[in-house]
Image (cartoon, rainbow, N blue to C red):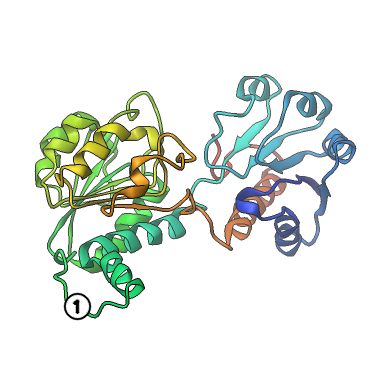
Amino acid sequence: MSELSVLQHKPHGMPATEYADALRERLPDVTVTLAATPAERRRAVADAPVVTSNDLDAELLDAADDLGLFACTYAGVDHLPLEALRERDVAVTNASGVHGPNVAEHVIGWLLTMVRRLDEGLRRQQRREWSHFQAAGELQSSTVTVVGLGAIGEAIVERLAGFGVETVGVRYTPGKGGPTDEVVGYDALPEVLPRTDHLVLACPLTDATRGLVDGTALELLPPDATLVNVARGPVVDTDALVETLRRNRLHAAALDVTDPEPLPEGHPLWTLENALLTPHTAGHTPHYFERCADILAENVRRVNESGAFEGLRNEV
C-alpha cells in the first residue's frame, strides 16, 4: 500500500494540513494526498486504499472503489455509515486514546482548582482584595470515583496516582477490571456515591449513561463533594444539578460539557459561583494530529507487512 488520502477537516480549528505533514514524516514511502475541494475529495478517494478524515458520506463512499481502510480521526464512529462500510468489507479505525493526556490534565486542573479554591483566589485578585480564605481541603486521602474506564478514564486514574487518593472505577462491564483500587458496575453507583469525594464523568453517552447523574444520585453525594464532567452533557440532569448547587448540596461542579450545549447566555449555570465552565475545550491539544498520525502510520505498516486490512490498532 503506497498511497493514502487525507480529506480536509478542522477538528478543534486545526487544518488537516498538519495531519498530512505528520503522516508524510512517518511514512516517507507513501504518497499522502490532501483533498480540500469536493472535486479533489472525489478524485482522492477514487483509487485510494486508505482514506482518513472525521467523516465519510455516502456519496464519497460510492466513489471509493478500492477502499480497504477508513481511519476516523474521532474516537466516536456512530456518525459513520458503518453498515455500508461493512458491506464493502472496509475496515474502520478510530482515534481512541488521542485525547487521553489532555483531557486527564483538564480534569486534574479542575480538581485542584475546586479543592484548593483557586477560583476564589482569582475572584479576589480581580477585586484587588488581599484577604485570606480557607481552602476546601486536600486531594490527598480523598476518594475519587471515575465513571468510564476507557482511554480517557485510564489516563485520569494514571495521573491521580501521585496524589495519594483512593480510586473507584465505574464501567459497564466491571469484570474487565481496571487501574483503579476498586471496579464496580453502573448498578453499584448508588452504593459508591455516599463515600465519593470527587466524582469524575468520562464515559460515553449511551442509553445506560444518559441521565446517570440525576437528582437522586446528586443527593447521595456528600455536600462537600465535587463533580467534574468531561463526558457528555446529557450524562448529568442539568436542572437537578442547578438546584443542588443553589442549595449548596455540592461544593462545586466543573463542566466542560453541558446540556444544552452551547450553554444559552441566560442559563443559571453562568451565574453560580460554584459552577465552573469551559466551552468543550478539554479535548483540544496541539498534539492531536501527531497522535492520529501515530495510529494510522502503525496500521499502514501492519497492512504492508500482512497484506490484509486485519489486526489493526483501534479497529472498531
Relative to 314, 211 lies left or right: left
- Residue at 40% of width from left, 35% of height from top? 259
* Type of the residue with mark 1: Ser
Q: Provide residue 302's location: percent of width, then percent of height.
A: 65, 48
Q: Provide residue 202's location: percent of width, then percent of height.
A: 36, 44
**Residue 61, quarter of the rendered image:** top right
14 or 162: which is nearer to us? Answer: 14
Relative to 75, 212 lies left or right: left
Q: Provide residue 90's location: percent of width, then percent of height.
A: 68, 29
- Residue at 83% of width from left, 45% of height from top? 35
**Residue 119, quarter of the rendered image:** bottom left
> Which residue is the site of mark 1?
131
271 or 300: which is nearer to us? Answer: 271
Under circle 1, the secondary element is loop
Give the tally of numbered discs. 1
Label 1: how many residues lie within 10 Å, few (<14), some (14-19) or many (20+)? few
